[in-house]
Image (spheres, rainbow, N blue to C red):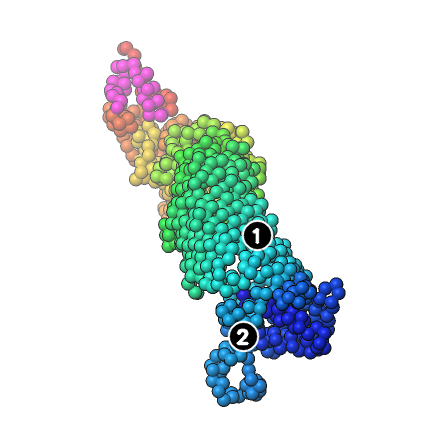
Amino acid sequence: MRRIVFGLLVLFGLAVAAVAAVPYVLPLDTIKTRVIAQVEKAAGWRLRLDGPVSISVVPQFSLVAEKVGISGEAGADGIEFAKAEELRVDLAWAGLIGGDVRVTGLRLVKPQLFLETSASGLTSWAPRRQLTPAEEAAEILGIASSGDAAASVAPETPVESEAPATTTEVAETGADTGLGALARIGVDRLEIEDGQVVYQDRRTGLKQQFNELALTLAAPDLTGEVALESSFIWQGQAVTVTGTAENPLGLAQGATAPVMLTATVAGAELGVNGDLSLKPLLANLKITGSGDNLAAVAEAFGVSGPVPAGSFSFFTKLDGSKDAVSLADLTGTIGSLSAEGQLQALLREGDPSHTGRLLIREAPLADLASLASVPVDATGQLAADLRFTAQGLNLDDVLDSLDINGTAEVRRGKLSGLNLSETLDLPGSANDVSDLNLQIALKGRDAPVSLSGSLSWLGEAFTVQGQSTFATLMSGNPAKTSLRVKAAPVTAGFEGTVSLNGSADGAVSLETANLRDLLARFGRPVEAGNGLRNFAVSGQFDKDGQRLLFKDTSFTLDETEGTASGSVSLGGKPSLQAALTFSRLGLDPYFSSAGSASAAGASAGSGQTSGAQSAGWSDAPLDLSALTLVDASVTADARQITYDGITIDRGNLSADLKNGLLTAKLADLSLYKGAGSADLTVSGASTPSIAAKFSLASVAARSLLQDAAGFDWLEGTAAITLDVKTTGASQKALVSGLTGTASYQFLDGAIRGLNIPKMLRGLSLETLLGWQDTSEEKTDFSSLTASFQIAQGIATTSDLRLIGPLVRMTGKGTTDMPQRTLDWRVEPRVVPTLEGQAPTPRAKGEDKKLAGLGVPVVIKGSWDNPQIYPDIAGILQNPEEAYKQLEALGGELTKIVKDGGKIDKDALAGAASEAVKRATGGNVQIDVQKVIEGKADDEEVLKAVEEGLGLPSGLLQGFGFGKKKKDE
């Protein structure tokens, strides 16, 4: 560039000399030819003067040339690196006469400079080689002439005998051409109007363009002060440059000269003031800058990435050479944020390196938030002490190699106006974070950046831990990042990637031991009740306006586990849209009464009868308030559903929840080796209501009834239908309010603990005292059916029917579900038929001996341990016929009954004592013999025995017990 400046000065000097010497002696064409020749000889450039050339003497001596162009070595094919529409040179008459040429004015109209460096390093302004006619002809023909070895080896090096004099040579020889001649030239005013300068380096891809160039240069003495004023458009920004330089000729010759420049761009002012030497390149400068918008300045200089948009200023002392640059006493401010530091750069060719330090003592967080255009109110301080190294010439290379060690701290911070309240539908206090104390530690490019500290939010103290991959982060790529925020009620975290532009992609996690308490702490209280305790969620989350999107998210809530994909609308009442997969769906916490959920859950998990089943229904208030928290529309595939001890192995669920009303359909249910479907409607109002329709087929009856109702004395394959509804504020109230219908059919099963044919064949006093559960005994059946009408929780049937081997049974009765009791009367009859077999042929009249025998049986009491005994009143309606059949069958009872139905009291007493002992476990001491003989008035004792054994009142007295003998 220096060669261009002084080449142009040589050009102007020669033109002036030509004009001064022969303005009236030579014709204009001759002048043009002479000027072209002198320029090419002195500067090595080819000058084109295509337009007219004119000379005027009034009011001053002037030379005007139009259509001017200049080309160097790269312009051999006609490409010019400089051209202008008009060149005007004004000369002072006194200078022409005295020999010191004084240019009073030099004006370029629409000049264009195209400065280019090719991929091989050749510049467009390089001077042309000086060739003899023979050499030029040989080059045109593509052959080498004799003695041209040097040119062929180094084609860009001018022939020594014809090369232009260098600046040093001119200074030393005092030649009248070049700088020696220019020393006697002054330029009162150089003007450029509407110029353009384009610089392009094809080696690096760098291209800069300056348009609308307007320049005024005052240089009355090139060994004195030169003043510059200019303006142009660069990077779309209006730029002005003004300044002065002392002794430009001395500066070109290697002298040190003071310079002062001031530039304005994008509303900022940049200044350079100090001493400069060009040969060798040395600088001792003070550099300053200030402006109203740092971001605009950064944009003008092509700096990408986030830059704060605030006022700024800086100062530094620069000491530099072509090999190294040092910035000392570096200070800068952005708003009221101040920093200081230093920088050293080693400018090794192709591998520049940088080291430095940045120190921020106490910067207000308010200014940082303002500069970052973050709309929050902030207090507190930021402090940092960072040392760094980097390599490269451009910003991208520097960031890619940046290595930082040090710490940055936020102290006593508080942030307000975070807009979290509206976004997450939280209390207004959610917009404030206080007691913010954070530390960021950087330990080198290859080590992770670590974050630690604490803060307070919504009245809770949180700790913060995190780290990120520094090298990846600084390269602008997504960096692996983890963050964990923990308080007493909740732990939240993030695992994924983040970028410097603020984008993030990864899994967010949240965990709490008590979701109900957490909601209350965060201003979303839920009515007291069960459920909403243990909660954990982890998955991919994103935000779209007021919607929170989640994908492949795993969760645990109370006794439920699964995965989900969908969205939640956060504005106002949350609304959930989701597709769910439950590995387990536990309903006990939400449909059990307060205070019993944990026990029910524990018993269900252990496979034992729950407390509600063993002790009765709970009358504690039932809490279904969880249904009012959200609106939802979900589909689900459940691999296990549990409720009150019942387990469904698999099912498909579709459910809609709106304003506390849940409507659900369960299809393809797989449970207890069978299948089923269900429709369920549940209202979470203050007084809950439930409507349910169930249809089950081929289920294992014993397992189902044991889990659902706590009794296990009935087994088989069952088909069950249920259509009920109820309303109530507790579990007991819901059961008491049940109305609807039900039916069941048990196939190929058994009544466990009871062998009806055997008992009918071997009646004994134990039968009279009530058949007790005997696990070894059972009554097989091929079918057992009944249908029920349900009102106020009491199920009534009149069509019970059992068909089995050797027995048929009909019956009717009620099941009191609120009291968990049975009151049934069944009529079993022994028949000569085995299950799955045709009747065995018998002699005529033989089957009649058994076919007519029937003993009405009463089943009464708690349904998990009912009393089963014969209806004696039914037997004694025809005692003679009953005795005959019993005598034919045999059995212990016939040993007690003598002729005419009289009782053998001794046998009866022994059997009764033994039976009472077994029935009561030996806890009741009764002298049955004295009672039978009438020696004691023991009616009250017998009543106690009857009550203790659960016998019908007066049963023993019906056989003559307890009556005293009359005195003879």
Q: How far apart are marks 2 and 1 (CA)?
A: 35 Å
- N-term-proximal mark, 2 vs 1: 2
Residue occupied by mark 1:
262
Q: Does the magenta stretch include residue 936?
A: yes
Q: In this view, does 29 lie to the left or right of 630?
A: right
- Which portion, as a residue range, is magenta? 923-951
Taking depth in this image into account, of 839 and 624 the one nearest to the observer is 624
Q: How crowded is mark 1: few (under 14 residues within 10 Å), some or many (20 or more)?
A: some
Residue occupied by mark 2:
164
Q: Does the magenta stretch include residue 511?
A: no
Rendered residue at 48%/61% (across/down): 255
Query: Can the viewer see residue 328?
Result: yes
Report x, y in % for residue 821: 42, 30
Taking depth in this image into account, of 251 and 959 the one nearest to the observer is 251
Mark 2 vs mark 1: give the one in front: 2
Q: Quadrant of residue 935?
A: top left
Residue type indicated by callout 2:
Pro
Query: Can the viewer see residue 299?
Result: no
Rendered-image quadrant of the C terminus = top left
Rendered residue at 57%/57% (across/down): 225
What SS does tag 2 mark?
loop
Rendered residue at 56%/87% (across/down): 134
Q: Which mark is residue 648?
A: none
